[in-house]
Amino acid sequence: GAGVSQSPSNKVTEKGKDVELRCDPISGHTALYWYRQSLGQGLEFLIYFQGNSAPDKSGLPSDRFSAERTGGSVSTLTIQRTQQEDSAVYLCASSLVGAGSYNSPLHFGNGTRLTVT
Amino acid sequence: GENVEQHPSTLSVQEGDSAVIKCTYSDSASNYFPWYKQELGKRPQLIIDIRSNVGEKKDQRIAVTLNKTAKHFSLHITETQPEDSAVYFCAAGEGGSYIPTFGRGTSLIVHP
C-alpha cells in the first residue's frame, strides 16, 4: 500500500519567509511524528500527534515552529520567519501506536529538504 | 527524558567481516528498541526491533541483543556486504505514549 507521503521534496526559501511542509500518513495510522535531520546529525524529535489527544510539542525548537493535524490525517509543519539554521531535512513518520502497544515501528516519509538562503 | 548514546559514529569494515554497533539508554521505563537503516538519500527504514522481555533476536545476518540491567543494546551484522553500507540508528522508547528517542547514528562502510 501507499507509504508516508511528504511534499515538497525540496524547498529553497529566503531568510525571513514562512514555509509549510506537508505530510500524508499511512491510512489508519493514529500517530504522526515530525523529526528534523541536520547534515550528518541524528533524528531530532519535533512534535507528536496521537489520535485526538493534545499534541506533544516538547521538541519544537522555538515559537517560530508550529504544526497541526487536520481530521486525524494530514499534517502541516509551519516555520515562520525562517533562519539559515532551519536548513535541514524534515522527516514525517506515522505508526499504529496505541496505549500499551509495543510493536509500533515508525514508517518514515522521504522527507522535505529545506534550504534557507 | 530518555537519552540514547550510540557508538561508534563511523565504522569501516571489509566485506565478510562482522560489524557491531552499541547503544546505551537512560530511562529504565523504555521497553521497545528498534533499529533503522538509512541509505544515502533515502528514508530511514526499520530493520529489526526488540522488546524488553527478550534478550536477543535474530533475522538472517542481523541480530540485536539487549541487556536491561546495564541499559544497553547492540546491533550485530555478520558477513557484511557492500549493500549494508548505510547509516544505522538505534532508538529507545516506552510503549504507550511512545515517542522514540534516536541515537546520533553510525555510518557503516563496507569495503569490497
Image: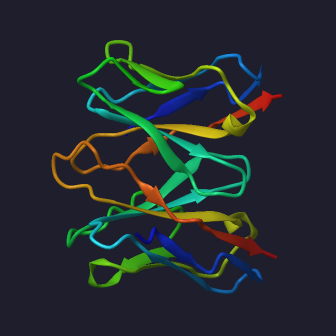
Q: Is residue A48 visible?
A: yes
Image coordinates of residue B50 in percent, x first then y, are 35, 31
* Image quarter hosting the N terminus of chain A: bottom left
Q: Residue furthest left?
A: A100
In this rendering, the count of numbered labels is: 0
- Residue A61 vs B67, above or below: the answer is below
* Image quarter hosting the C terminus of chain A: bottom right
Say which quarter of the image contains residue B104.
top right
- Left or right: where does residue B43 sit relative to residue A84? left
| Colour scheme in use | rainbow
Say which quarter of the image contains residue B82.
top right
Image coordinates of residue A88 in percent, x first then y, are 68, 63
- Residue B6 vs A21, above or below: the answer is above
Which of the pair A85/B22 is nearer the observer?
B22
Residue at point 74%, 82% (across, down): A13
Which of the pair B78/B103 is nearer the observer?
B78
Image coordinates of residue A89 in percent, x first then y, are 65, 63
- Left or right: where does residue B25 sit relative to residue B30? right
Residue at point 77%, 83% (across, down): A14
Residue at point 76%, 32% (across, down): B109
Q: Is residue A59 visible?
A: no
Which of the pair A62/B28 is nearer the observer?
B28
Q: Residue furthest front?
A: B60
Residue at point 67%, 46% (across, down): A41
- Left or right: where does residue B37 sit relative to residue A73? right
Image coordinates of residue A116 in percent, x first then y, are 76, 74
